[in-house]
Amino acid sequence: MRSRKPAKSDRQFQTVPQVAEMLGVGPNKILGWIRTGDIVATDLSQSQNARPRWHIATAEVDRFVAARRSVPATTPIPVSHRKPKSSIVEFVK
């Protein structure tokens, strides 16, 4: 009897390409966020000198997305298209 491969939504960890596809960005963008510490990832490579094999927890992706979610302003900011009035009056000859 073969064991069932977990569905993408059931996985605890995701690879860089999977997260990039989820967020609609390129893998290099995800690697940049890992380098800067915006996304916490685990390197599962065999040794420290090997090429990194980053795995990102699904909960970490959820945290990252929630932290970047925009918050609507509670009160609208008035926009004035008029130039501010100057206290100096110019006379032209």
Image: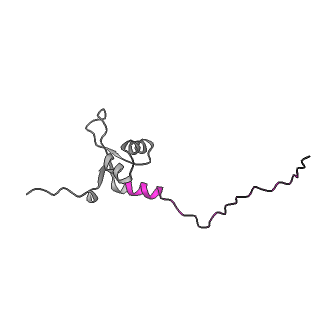
Marker count (numbered):
0
Asked if the magenta segment contains residue 15, the reply would be no
Identify the coloring.
one colour
- Report the predominant secondary structure element of the magenta stretch: loop
Q: Nearer the viewer, residue 14 or 84?
A: 84
Q: Is residue 66 above or below residue 18?
A: below
- Which residue reaches farthest right? 93
Is 23 placed left or right of 13 in the picture? right
Q: Nearer the viewer, residue 18 or 79?
A: 79
Give the magenta range: 60-89
- Residue 24 position, x and y percent, is 38, 51
Q: Is residue 45 above or below residue 10?
A: above
Is 36 placed left or right of 5 in the picture? right
- Residue 75 position, x and y percent, is 62, 67
Asked if the magenta segment contains residue 63, the reply would be yes
- Which residue reaches farthest front? 93
- Which residue reaches farthest left? 1
- Which residue reaches farthest bottom? 75
For the point 31% across and 38% down, the residue is 52
Is 58 placed left or right of 4 in the picture? right
Location of residue 10 (image quadrant): bottom left
- Residue 82 position, x and y percent, is 73, 58
For the point 90% across and 49% down, the residue is 91
Is 2 placed left or right of 14 in the picture? left
Location of residue 45 (image quadrant): top left
Q: Nearer the viewer, residue 74 or 41?
A: 74
In the rendered image, the quadrant that contains the N terminus is bottom left
- Residue 14 position, x and y percent, is 30, 51
